[in-house]
Image: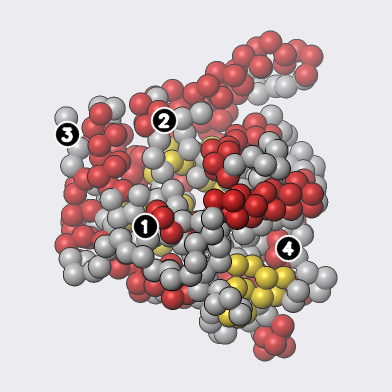
Amino acid sequence: MSIRAEDLILISVDDHIIEPPDLFDAHLPERYKAEAPRIVRRADGADVWRFGEVEVPNVALNAVAGRPKEEYGVEPQSLEEIRPGCFMVDERVKDMNAGGVLSSMNFPSFPGFAARLFAVEDEGFGLALVRAYNDWHIDEWCGAHPGRFIPMALPVIWSAEKCAEEVRRVADKGCHSLTFTENPAALGYPSFHDPYWDPLWTAVCDTDTVLSIHLGSSGQLNFPAPDSPADVMITLQPMNIQAAAADLLWSRVLKEFPAIRIALSEGGTGWVPYFLERVDRTYDMHHLWTGQDFGGRMPSEVFRQHFLTCFISDHTGVYLRHEIGVDNISWECDYPHSDSAWPGAPEELAQVMTEAAVTPDEVAKITHENAMRWYSFDPFAHVARERATVGALRASAADHDVSIKAMSDREKLTPEQMQARWAKLGDASAGSGAEKASV
């Protein structure tokens, strides 16, 4: 059976915001505004977020939607060099319509996926920044177009107690997703195995909040050698999320907090069948001496209870969906990052699902129903189903320009210069463990 792209209903569980300059204007207490992060234009024409002595550029792979691949790279950009939909919510919705995406969950950019940038000496200031960001995201960004965005909150990464309080606060506002690090130990905090985090695990269970763990959120990049090409790091990015899945699966967390749910954001799905085979064999061969006990269940069963896997373009994962669990798979667009197929993602997805003989019930789960169930989100309370399909959304944006066009007139880096920059990023990651802006 052929699956038609125009008939799909698509909810993306992983997209990204390039934060606008006025983010903190309405939500940060007055006493902190003078020291708040702000966008400044450097002498080289790049717009960067400056916070104290820290500068966070908009790394080019973060915002390449609508640009030719020749303009991909790592050099910083100005806001004029990226699509307005990256940082303006009304324009984002137009881009979503043109790309056939009904709803989207948006990860942060400049604070980092775990908001470690806000872990400052003045904890009151840091907490105010987290709350201001979350209020802006929930009330302004998501609130501007009800039914079009799944709200997501930043964590208070430096305090499990304060983070638990923030989870409960934003849950009262309808937010049931918390972006979190794939490895808190790499950021200098207690590991997943430490009871330190128990107040947070209790809060996410009590509020039906998903722990959304994005690859790269530990601040560690996989650079086997300082002179490894950038392609190596890009290829190995999903390996971080696999390590997080193993660390959490074998931890005490899932045993002591059976209601906890974890999304492995942008981690792909093709690796999951072998991972499940491996953890089951590991349990069978070793649990008698390691002391692992899943109450009579196999690790693969426990994985399917607790983990949502997410993919952009993953033929292997779609073909092996029954080995993963169809209830544990969600699609993502990754707009405006370089892995995204926007605005042609529906056609790409429809083709692979047709080739893999995905049934209509399975299509619905993978494209939107699993996302709705996991994130306690109902777009149809605001958007009628007949207006929610790829075809209907695109018809509403028929005059919206989605043509690929060059948007930068700055001089391109040579391959040698780009390699040097990637090596510098790898050195910084390996040396300090500091969280970097996502790429």
**Residue 68, which numbered label?**
1
Q: Residue at x 46, y 56 (%)?
A: 72
The residues bearing labels 4 and 3 have C-alpha atoms spaced at a distance of 50 Å
Image location (x, y in percent) of residue 406: 36, 65
Q: Residue at x 61, y 78 (%)?
A: 42
| Residue contact at pointers 4 and 3, CB within 8 angstroms | no
**Residue 2, which numbered label?**
3
Given residues 425 and 197, the one toward you in this image is 425
Q: Residue at x 39, y 40 (%)?
A: 313
The residues bearing labels 2 and 3 have C-alpha atoms spaced at a distance of 19 Å
Question: Relative to 215, does residue 107 appear above or below in the rendering?
Answer: below
Image location (x, y in percent) of residue 92: 37, 68
Where residue 153 sits, quadrant-wise, is: bottom right
Comes first in the chain, label 1 or label 3: 3
Q: Secondary structure at mark 2?
A: helix
Q: Secondary structure at mark 4?
A: helix
Image location (x, y in percent) of residue 20: 51, 75
The residues bearing labels 1 and 3 have C-alpha atoms spaced at a distance of 30 Å
**Residue 162, which numbered label?**
4
The residues bearing labels 4 and 2 have C-alpha atoms spaced at a distance of 37 Å
- Kindly identify the amino acid type of the residue bearing the numbered disc 3: Ser
Comes first in the chain, label 2 or label 3: 3
Q: Residue at x 41, y 55 (%)?
A: 70
Given residues 180 and 19, the one toward you in this image is 19
